[in-house]
Image: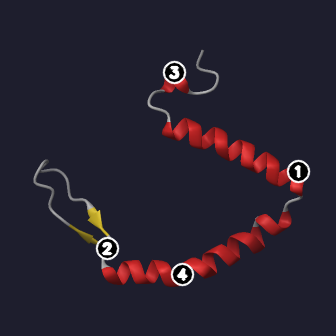
């Protein structure tokens, strides 16, 4: 990662992925996926996985909603 100056805002210094950083991410991804499977997915029953999917979708909808009024329970 490296920081680059953002001319649109003197306060901003966005982080930019370098080629080395991208390679490190690609190299780590298979081990990460294997670990998530071993320590989470493989431990859950099919019913628990369905619950996890439902909960994850609610969280994703909330985090990507244009405003809070579109979140569940905000009526």
- Give the distance between the C-alpha atoms of the residues marked 3 and 1, in whole angstroms: 30 Å
- Give the distance between the C-alpha atoms of the residues marked 1 and 2, in whole angstroms: 40 Å
Q: Residues within 10 Å of mark 3 (few under 14, many from 20)?
A: few
Q: Residues within 10 Å of mark 2 (few under 14, many from 20)?
A: few
Which sits earlier in the primary sequence, circle 1 or circle 2? Answer: 2
Question: Split into 4 quadrants, where in the image is the C terminus?
Answer: top right
Image height of 40 relative to 54, above or below = below
Which sits earlier in the primary sequence, circle 1 or circle 4? Answer: 4
Which sits earlier in the primary sequence, circle 4 or circle 2? Answer: 2
Q: Quadrant of residue 58?
A: top right
Circle 1: element type = helix
The disc placed on residue 56 is none
- Give the distance between the C-alpha atoms of the residues marked 3 and 2, in whole angstroms: 36 Å
Q: Residues within 10 Å of mark 1 (few under 14, many from 20)?
A: few
- Circles 3 and 1 in contact, beta carbons < 8 Å: no
Q: Residues within 10 Å of mark 4 (few under 14, many from 20)?
A: few
Question: Split into 4 quadrants, where in the image is the N terminus?
Answer: bottom left
Q: Which residue is mark 4?
A: 28
Q: Quadrant of residue 17?
A: bottom left
- Circles 4 and 3 in contact, beta carbons < 8 Å: no
- Spot occupied by residue 6 in the image (x, y as percentages of width and height): 15, 56
In the displayed structure, does residue 57 sit left or right of residue 16?
right
Task: Name the residue at 58% across, 20% down.
Answer: 74
The disc placed on residue 69 is 3
Task: Name the residue at 44% across, 31% down.
Answer: 66
The disc placed on residue 1 is 2
Q: Which residue is mark 1?
A: 47
């Amino acid at each position: 990662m490296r920081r680059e100056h953002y001319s649109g805002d003197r306060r901003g210094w966005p982080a930019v992925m370098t080629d080395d950083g991208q390679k490190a991410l690609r190299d780590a991804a298979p081990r990460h996926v294997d670990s998530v499977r071993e320590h989470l997915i493989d431990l859950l029953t099919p019913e628990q996985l369905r619950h996890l999917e439902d909960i994850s979708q609610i969280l994703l909808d909330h985090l990507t909603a244009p405003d809070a009024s579109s979140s569940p329970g905000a009526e």
